[in-house]
Image (tube, rainbow, N blue to C red):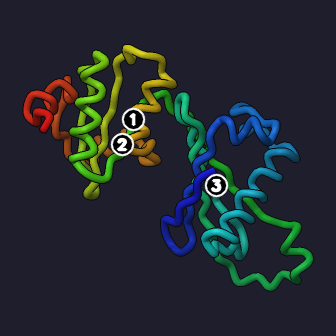
Amino acid sequence: MRLERLTHNKIKIFLTFDDLMDRGLTKDDLWKDTFKVQQLFRDMIEEASSELGFEVNGSIAVEVYSLPAQGMVVIVTSEEQDYDFDEEFADDYIEMQVTLDESEDIFYEFQTFEDVIQLAHRLYAIGCVDGTLYSYQQRFYLHVSEEPPITTDDFIAVLAEFGSSSTITIHRVEEYGKKLMDRRAIEQIVHYFPAH
C-alpha cells in the first residue's frame, strides 16, 4: 500500500492486488459492503493518519479506480463537518460515499519528458511503437491502446519504472490537456530523441 497526500483533506492510496490478497480480498469484493471491505478502509485511514497526519472529521468520500494488472487507486476526501461526536462514537462510525470506476485503459503519468523518452526507448526495444502522448498540468501522459508485445503484467512493470498509473481519467486529459503526439508516439519519440 502506497500513500500520498494530495491536499489538506485528500489522500491517494495505491493498493496492489497482492495487498488485497493479503487481506483475503479480491478486486470484485470492493464492490460489496462487507466487514472485510469496511476493515480495509478503516486500516487505510488509520495508516494515513499515522503516516501523513490525515485526520477524518465527519464523513469521507471514497473513489476507487481499478487499473488493469496493477491494482486499485483509492482517493479519500475528508468532508469536514462541525458535528461534536463523543470520542467513543466517532471511533466506531465513519460515513462513506463510495464511487467505483473500472478502466481497461493503460494510461500512465510521468513527471518529466525525460522519463517519457527513456520509457519510449525501452518500449521500442521490445516492439511497442504505438501510443498517444498528452501534456496536462505540467505532467505528461501516455495512453497505449495496442495489445502489448509482452504480457500485460510485464508491460505494466516497465511503465511503472518511469511513471505511475494515472488517477486522472483519459477523458479529462483529452478534454483539458494538449495532445502532443497522436499516433505511434513511442516510435516518434525514439525517432526525434535518439538515445544519448
> The residue tagged with tag 1: helix, strand or loop?
helix
Disc 2 to disc 1: CB gap under 8 Å: yes
> The residue tagged with tag 3: helix, strand or loop?
strand
Instruction: Residue 191 in the image: state x and y as whole percent.
Output: 9, 28
Disc 2 to disc 3: CB gap under 8 Å: no
Which residue of the protein is positioned furthest toward the left in this rendering? 192
Image quadrant assignment for residue 156: top left
The residue shown at (26%, 41%) is 116
Q: Which badge, 3 or 1, comes first in the chain's sequence? A: 3
Q: Which mark is residue 5?
A: none
Q: Which mark is residue 159?
A: 1
Left or right relative to 55: residue 115 = left
Q: Which mark is residue 162?
A: 2
Image quadrant assignment for residue 146: top left
- Distance of mark 2 from mark 3, alpha carbons? 27 Å
Q: Which residue is mark 3?
A: 62
Instruction: Residue 76 in the image: state x and y as whole percent.
Output: 61, 59
Left or right relative to 79: residue 183 = left
Instruction: Residue 84 in the image: state x and y as whole percent.
Output: 80, 85
Left or right relative to 21: residue 177 = left
Circle 2 or circle 3, nearest the eye: 2
Q: Nearer the viewer, residue 195 or 60?
A: 195
The residue shown at (76%, 82%) is 83
Image quadrant assignment for residue 12: bottom right
Q: Is the C terminus in the top left, top right, bottom left or bottom right quadrant? A: top left
